[in-house]
Amino acid sequence: MDQLISPYGGNLVNLIDPAKTEALKQEAFSLPSIDLDWRQQCELEMLMTGAYSPLTGFMTRAQCAQVETGQKLDDGTFWPLPISLVFQKPVTAKMKPGDRVALRDGEGYMLAILTIADVWDDAGVWHVGGKVEGVALPPHPDFASLRATPAEMRALFARRGWRRVVAWQARQPMHRAQFEFCLKSAISHEANLLLHPKAGGDITDAPGYFGLVRSFLAIRDRFPTATTQLSLLPAPPREANPRSLLLRAIVARNFGCALMIAGGQHLSDGHYRRGEDLDEPDADNQMKQADHIGVKLIAYPRMVYVEDRAEYMPESEAPPGSRLLTLSGEEFHRRLQSGLKIPDWYSFPEVLAELKRQNPPRDRQGFTVFFTGLSGAGKSTLARMLAARLMETGGRMVTLLDGDIVRRNLSSELGFSKAHRDINVRRIGFVASEITKNCGIAICAPIAPYQQTRRDVRAMIEAVGGFIEVHVATPIETCEARDRKGLYAKARAGLIPEFTGVSDPYEVPENAELAIDTTSLGIEEAVQQVLLKLEHEGYLR
């Protein structure tokens, strides 16, 4: 091969024309705007830079259907997956074909103008298709020196004299097995290596990619500098399946790679193998379609560590009688979370150091204890006592987010309507998630009567740490008998509208980690139950 592989479709698309950007910016002042979330910005960036060449915009409904059923574009070019602008809310419902709309990031930064060709609702998910005229790429304040468009990457390859390049598009950190396979694959195919970890994410909504990138920075120096390049791929996350694999192959080709390693990520059974990306019964067909794209797939095999030879090898090539060592992904993560030793043959110390910093053991992770129950159930008393016990032990900062405290300092303008109570609990959840994310302990004690709101708060917090829901299941008769403020009496007299348990329902938690009835249980005993649960889950030692 005496030159780089050409872009898919023949020409590399660039949807940003510097000669038109100023006029587009001026036009945007008179256009309606749509603010894109980070996933939508990733998809737009892949389009504008030509990573999705030959596409010049988002697909219409008919084009998406054509790709779903026939896997081809209008001109017959093979294409594996629909690419449309997707919204979970009907923000474009009033827009119609022919309308032009400015696409902006969350801070109003102008990215592109979209000429709408189609808008449709698919089971509550809204899709938009149309031509894109780019103005600027989404700004990236992070890892700026590691970001390159397909055109920039191709120019870099040309300057370095690279003609044959193999891509490793990673969404997980690289350990010794992947390292050795990537290096051997590049050598055996007489190719250079592009390490292309997926850094599609947002510094506030989805910061998990920071640890991934830092792990690649840690391992980069182990590769030969002259034949290896590290760059970030701003691709949105997709489910691993044969079609997404083929889209990745198209992206690899547009970045100048004629080969791509398929597989090598954790599977549900803990192993690494090509079956993660290639549908085994249809593997040959996927290989043929990749050949049609023009990219050779290198299937990642099941790798084992051959102790006698002190190296990783495909299991099928291991010498008979050798001692073979493996460590499942599940076991690796268990050891990582528990602070247990991870064998030297599994990974490199600099990578493990980064992952341990990113994933501390549970007894050093942040967590939230979320008390919920009727007014007078004992939530605030339990929360205050638990906070005191945890402060006595030390080790992590503890923050008490009791209902009255939050109402006074965070939600003083809110009333007690269903909508306002919902907003109040979501605010508590957000603050607790920030505390948890930063390895602190949040103790929350709102009434939180609605199941869906509690589910959303749980999802928000579990994305960054631990979540323990405690249903203070004290019966309403006991709560009413304890009522020092006379709130229940006022509610029954109709003086307090929408009062939980009287004129508004309390939805009992479905899957609370703990249920406590304080009718006949002392506060010390109840708090001890929570502490034992935290200890059992590994958050306390």
Image (cartoon, rainbow, N blue to C red):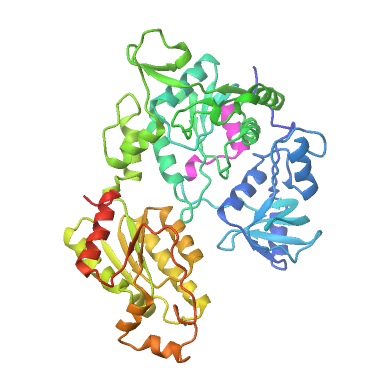
Residue 528: image location, x then y, percent: 22, 61
Residue stretch in magenta? 144-159
Q: 92 or 155: which is nearer to us?
A: 92
Instruction: Give the residue at x 44% y 66%.
Output: 508
Toward the top, the furthest residue is: 320
Toward the left, the furthest residue is: 392
Residue 329: image location, x then y, percent: 41, 33
- Report the side of 130 relative to 398 (left or right): right
- Report the side of 451 relative to 125 (left or right): left
For the question of whether residue 354 can be seen, the reply is: no
Does 309 sit above or below residue 369? above
- SS assignment for the magenta stretch, majority: helix
Instruction: Give the residue at x 70% y 26%.
Output: 289
Image quadrant occupied by the N terminus: top right
- Report the side of 264 relative to 534 (left or right): right
Is residue 306 within the magenta segment?
no
Find residue 339 and report its image quarter. top left
The count of marks equals 0
Does 150 sit above or below residue 539? above
Q: 305 or 512: which is nearer to us?
A: 512
- Report the side of 218 relative to 523 (left or right): right
Is residue 158 within the magenta segment?
yes
Residue 153: image location, x then y, percent: 58, 34
Does 92 sit above or below residue 45? below
Q: 438 or 156: which is nearer to us?
A: 438
Q: 347 or 449: which is nearer to us?
A: 449
Residue 349: image location, x then y, percent: 30, 31
For the question of whether residue 220 can be seen, the reply is: yes
